[in-house]
Amino acid sequence: MCGLFINADADLWESKTRSMRIEGVVTSIRMETFFWNILQEIACRDEMTVNQLVTKLYLESLDADHDVGNFTSFLRVCCGRYLSLSADGHLQRDEAKPLAGLASAKLIEKETEAANLRQLNAANRRGESH
């Protein structure tokens, strides 16, 4: 199992810093190349640059009254959720289909159901009961 992770391209976990301007303020975000690659894929789906996507996520997070104190972690979780939704079959990794028009409430519901099922299955394997 570990070979799958140990033998991966080491560039994927190399940190890269990108400077960008959000509402006129210059900021820097440091993340691993892997996450920048996923953000690039997500941005391409809606014909945006990574900077435009990050800015949009930041501003919409503020509008939703989210704590953006650890915005970089939020971006990593966005990438993980994108991949998880794809792995669970709720979302296709097809850059030709924009994400903007998707029924996000329905996807979040499916995501929650899949997570609950995984937790139940894990508990059953450990012999726990609910």
Image (cartoon, rainbow, N blue to C red):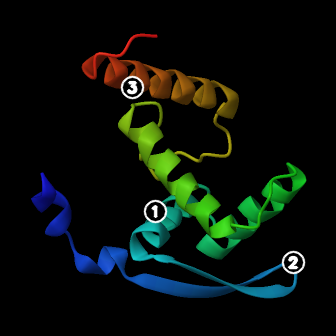
Q: Earlier in the sequence, mark 3 or mark 1?
A: 1
Q: Is residue 95 visible?
A: yes
The number of numbered badges drawn on the structure is: 3
Residue displayed at 26% across by 20% down = 125
Image depth: mark 3 or mark 1 in front: 3
Q: Residues within 10 Å of mark 2 (few under 14, many from 20)?
A: few
Q: How far separated are the C-alphas under marks 2 and 3?
A: 40 Å
Image quadrant where residue 18 sits: bottom right
Which residue has dot 3 on it? 118
Which numbered dot is residue 38?
1
Looking at the picture, does residue 4 appear above or below residue 108? below
Spot occupied by residue 52 in the image (x, y as percentages of width and height): 70, 70
Q: Quadrant of residue 67?
A: bottom right
Label 1 sits on what residue type? Ile
- Return the x and y of residue 71 as percentages of the image width and height: 69, 66
Residue shown at 47% from the left, 37% from the top: 91
Label 2 or label 3, whichever lies nearer to me, is: 3
Q: Which type of secondary structure does the marked residue at label 2 adopt?
A: loop
- Rendered view: 47 above or below 52: above
| Residue at position x 47%, y 28% in the image | 115
SS at mark 3?
helix
Q: Which mark is residue 86?
A: none
Residue that label 2 marks: 23
Identity, as a three-letter code, of the amino acid under mark 2 = Glu
Asked if residue 55 lies left or right of residue 110, the reply is right
Q: CA distance from mark 3 to mark 1?
A: 24 Å
